[in-house]
Image (tube, rainbow, N blue to C red):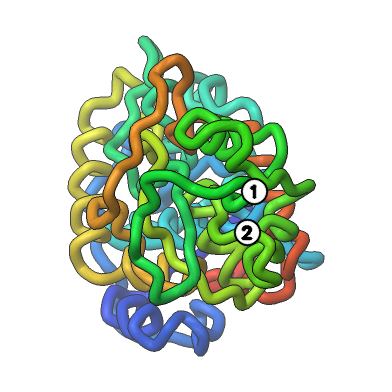
Amino acid sequence: MKHRVSLVVAFACAFCFALGLAGCSQAGSYEGKTLTPTISSPTIGQNGTLRVGIDADGGAPFVTSSSSASYAGIDVDMAAALADQLGLKLELVDVAGNASSALADGDVDIVMSQTSTEKSSTMWVSDPYIETGVALFASNGSTTVPESVQASSIAAQSSSTSAWAVQNAFGDDALNPASDLVSAFSLVETGKSQYVAADAVIGSYAALVQSVDVQPIALLGSKGGYCIGVNSSNQELQKAISAALTAVRGNGVFDAVCTKWLGSPMNLDALSTIEVSSSKSVSAGDDSDEKSAEGGSAETASSSTAGANAVQPGSTR
């Protein structure tokens, strides 16, 4: 399924983001000078349009879909911002499970939600457009990183990468397993656990929609991230995407997207790191099972509060 999104002019988009992304009407309601495309065919497959592959089943906060078949989420907002930065319209294409083949076949120009491990002879991946990792969340105001913990003091979704990281760093007794991420945060709300371990991005979204007053205080293991994939032979597009991503991350739009979906800008560099064994990677974002398991739970918690896409479709076809 494809959705073509007519983007607003730069100042209107920036203004909309600055106002919290809450008051944006359809793109067609804006007037002004349209940005001049900075790239064209054959760098992209269709002049004037950036065709972006997304996983329509990715779940909140990355991609959600409504009954009207419109998409919303971090991936959608970032794709819209990148297209706007390049002076292009946006076309969203569902490539769930087929990102590499969609790029190779020329069905899309770029794909969202890739990881560094997916770099291959046919796919180049950018620096992360949003970093993540297994984070330790504590109640707001609590900034002390634990060196040791009491039994059952860290809640995490059972059988997730986060649960494994807790057991690895603090021992089996430290884990208070929960059936899903919603339940894990509830254990902190009710005082049955002191901390929650979860993917930093998905956990922040879950806490926001549940109105749980927590903040990440440390990372369990190394960082990962969600990146943009481009055909490995298309060096011009790789350069253009890298430059556009740097601009979007530096002009306030990225922080506004994070604030919309996660409650605040995402800055994992400020967090200390708790070492875990290198016998298994705990860089969330490299673990699709954790993303789908915890992401699904977070979406179930309050899909109605996900919010509208930052740039609304002016037309779909």
Residue at 29% over, 25% down: 234
Mark positioned earlier in the residue sequence (1 or 2): 1
Residue at 21% over, 32% down: 236
Can residue 79 be seen here? The reply is: yes
Q: Which amino acid, mark 1? A: Ser
Percent position of residue 175, x then y: 63, 42
Front residue of this view, candidates 248 and 91 = 248
Front residue of this view, candidates 37 and 261 = 261
Q: Is 223 left or right of 106, judged from the image as shown?
A: left
Residue indicated by mark 2: 193
Q: Secondary structure at mark 2?
A: loop
Residues at badges 1 and 2 in contact (C-beta under 8 Å)?
yes
Q: Is 154 left or right of 133, judged from the image as shown?
A: right
Percent position of residue 195, x then y: 54, 57
**Distance Cα–Cα, label 1 vs label 2:** 6 Å
Q: Is 18 drawn above or below residue 290 in the view shown?
A: below
Percent position of residue 177, x then y: 71, 44
Q: Is 238 drawn above or below residue 119 in the view shown?
A: below
Q: Is 277 drawn above or below residue 48 in the view shown?
A: above
Q: Which mark is residue 152?
A: 1
Front residue of this view, candidates 194 and 33 = 194
Badge 2, how many Cα within 10 Å: few under 14, some, many 20+?
many
Pick out the residue farthest to the front: 150
Residue at 51% over, 62% down: 204
Q: Secondary structure at mark 1?
A: loop
Q: Which amino acid, mark 2? A: Ser
Q: Is 192 drawn above or below residue 150 in the view shown?
A: below
Can residue 114 be seen here? The reply is: no
Q: Which mark is residue 8?
A: none
Badge 1, how many Cα within 10 Å: few under 14, some, many 20+?
some
Residue at 41% over, 66% down: 258
